[in-house]
Image (cartoon, rainbow, N blue to C red):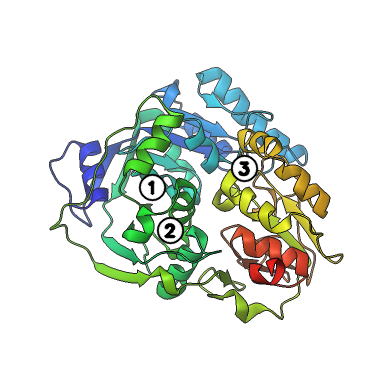
């Protein structure tokens, strides 16, 4: 079996499972946020449920519109807060909250070999530690709140083998953008994307989280990387345990195997209005920008802020550009302060936001007006994603985003550092 099949089999009590099989599996962790959580709670109450199956396995994270931007968002968070108090679930409020897919691993809630569901499409992020993790609907979450189970169809797997070493300014974001550009936004629809090879083995956990985070942008059910010593070091640094380390059998069956040499990949930029519109950054040098966003569950971790600060140090943001920096969690914000990164950003003319999804979904903290152009380290650039339906969002890694902020147009980092 593949690693995905092994984890699913272990969670439904079968010796083996196969692609296309319908299963009911036990869940190790359930996540919902301030948009999806109230809907799940409404369904929970419609079912006349009296209690949740296990409060310690439910995590409610208000991160999309927090700090609350208006009365409606405040009411949505209040629903989560009240439910959490009543049922004693995990809840992260302002001052302790972070962007959910950066927060949960940091809190040691994600272990290898786990089965995790989240009422958010980017819940596939946690596959980076060798877990099966996927996004589901709010009704599925309500059912799981009550029963601790999820109904699934076992996905077929595609193996992606990455050879070579990444060049300077190329990392996890560029690998996944290039991959999505190669197979398309539906190229892995309801499939497991399994990432392996020399290039993956040499990536940090932050880069691995980035790759698995965007598996959904290729339509995948989940993204997953077999755990290794880097995974083990990370898990032991944030948790009391590491979970169960699964790996695919040598004779496991794959729907397809795709090999990619990362040494030939330069920094990538995805043009509006799909993540699959990815090409080398140098092909976009004539695109002028109005806004830059560096953050999100994709690239708001400390290594991302370090990369952006390295580009920004001693320089100034272009006068026509506004730059929003969003540390993904409180701990990341504190670390950035200790390292002087926040001072570098502010000296360059950036503004620092508290942890929030904010502009990524056009919620707040940086919504675009008609005709405006942004380059962002976020994961989606659909029509109207960051604001007005006639605005435009380009996706990139943190170095490209900051270099573009300084130049006032989409730029390769080398243009700033030379």
Image disc number at residue 328: 3
Which type of secondary structure does the marked residue at label 2 adopt?
helix
Crowding at dot 3, Cα within 10 Å, few <14 / some 14-19 / many 20+, comes out as many
Among numbered discs 1 and 2, the one appearing first in the sequence: 1
Residue at x 82% of width, y 59% of height: 316
Q: Nearer the viewer, mark 2 or mark 3?
A: 3
**Where does residue 134 sit, x and y in percent of width and height?**
40, 48
- According to the picture, the residue beneath numbered tag 1 turns out to be 127
Question: Horizontal placement of 248 versus 332: left or right?
Answer: left
Q: Which residue is mark 2?
A: 215
> Spatial distance from mark 1 to mark 3, Cα to Cα?
18 Å
284, above or below 8, in the image:
below
* 266, 32: nearer the viewer: 266
Give the side of residue 128 with respect to residue 45, left or right.
left
In this rendering, position of residue 339 left or right of residue 163: right
Element on which disc 3 rests: loop
Q: Are marks 2 and 3 in contact (CB under 8 Å)?
A: no
Instruction: Estimate the x, y position of residue 357 in percent, counting from the top left.
Output: 64, 47
Q: Is residue 245 visible?
A: yes
Q: Can you give x and y, in whole percent of width and height, for residue 80 in the image?
A: 60, 30
């Amino acid at each position: 079996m593949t690693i995905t099949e092994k984890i699913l089999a272990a969670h439904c009590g079968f010796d083996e499972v196969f692609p296309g099989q319908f299963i009911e599996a036990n869940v190790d962790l359930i996540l919902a946020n301030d948009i999806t959580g109230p809907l799940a709670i409404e369904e929970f109450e419609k079912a006349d449920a009296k209690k949740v199956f296990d409060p310690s396995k439910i995590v409610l994270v208000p991160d999309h519109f927090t700090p609350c931007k208006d009365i409606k968002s405040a009411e949505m968070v209040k629903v989560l807060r009240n439910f959490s108090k009543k049922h004693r679930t995990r809840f992260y409020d302002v001052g302790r909250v972070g962007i959910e897919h950066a927060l949960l691993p940091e809190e040691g809630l994600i272990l290898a070999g786990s089965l995790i569901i989240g009422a958010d499409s980017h819940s596939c992020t946690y596959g980076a530690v060798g877990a099966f993790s996927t996004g589901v609907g709010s009704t599925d979450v309500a059912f799981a709140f009550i029963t601790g189970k999820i109904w699934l169809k076992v996905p077929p797997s595609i193996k992606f083998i990455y050879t070579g070493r990444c060049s300077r300014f190329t990392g996890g974001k560029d690998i996944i953008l290039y991959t999505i550009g190669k197979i398309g936004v539906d190229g892995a629809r309801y499939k497991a994307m399994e990432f392996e090879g020399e290039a993956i083995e040499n990536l940090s956990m932050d880069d691995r989280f980035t790759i698995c985070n965007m598996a959904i942008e290729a339509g995948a059910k989940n993204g997953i990387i077999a755990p290794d010593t880097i995974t083990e070091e990370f898990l032991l640094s944030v948790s009391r345990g590491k979970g169960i380390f699964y790996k695919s059998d040598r004779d496991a069956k794959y729907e397809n195997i795709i090999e990619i040499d990362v040494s030939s990949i330069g920094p990538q930029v995805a043009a509006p209005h799909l993540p699959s519109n990815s090409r080398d950054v140098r092909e976009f040098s004539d695109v002028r920008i109005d806004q830059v966003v560096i953050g999100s569950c994709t690239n708001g971790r400390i290594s991302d802020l370090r990369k952006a600060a390295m580009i920004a140090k001693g320089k100034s943001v272009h006068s026509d550009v506004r730059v929003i920096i969003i540390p993904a969690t409180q701990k990341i914000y504190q670390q950035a302060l200790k390292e002087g990164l926040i001072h570098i950003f502010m000296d360059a003319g950036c503004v620092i936001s508290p942890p929030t999804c904010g502009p990524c979904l056009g919620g707040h903290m940086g919504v675009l007006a008609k005709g405006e152009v942004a380059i962002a380290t976020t994961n989606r650039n659909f029509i109207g994603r960051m604001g007005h339906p006639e605005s435009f969002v380009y996706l990139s890694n943190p170095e490209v985003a900051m270099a573009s902020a300084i130049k006032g147009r989409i730029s390769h980092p080398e243009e700033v550092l030379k």
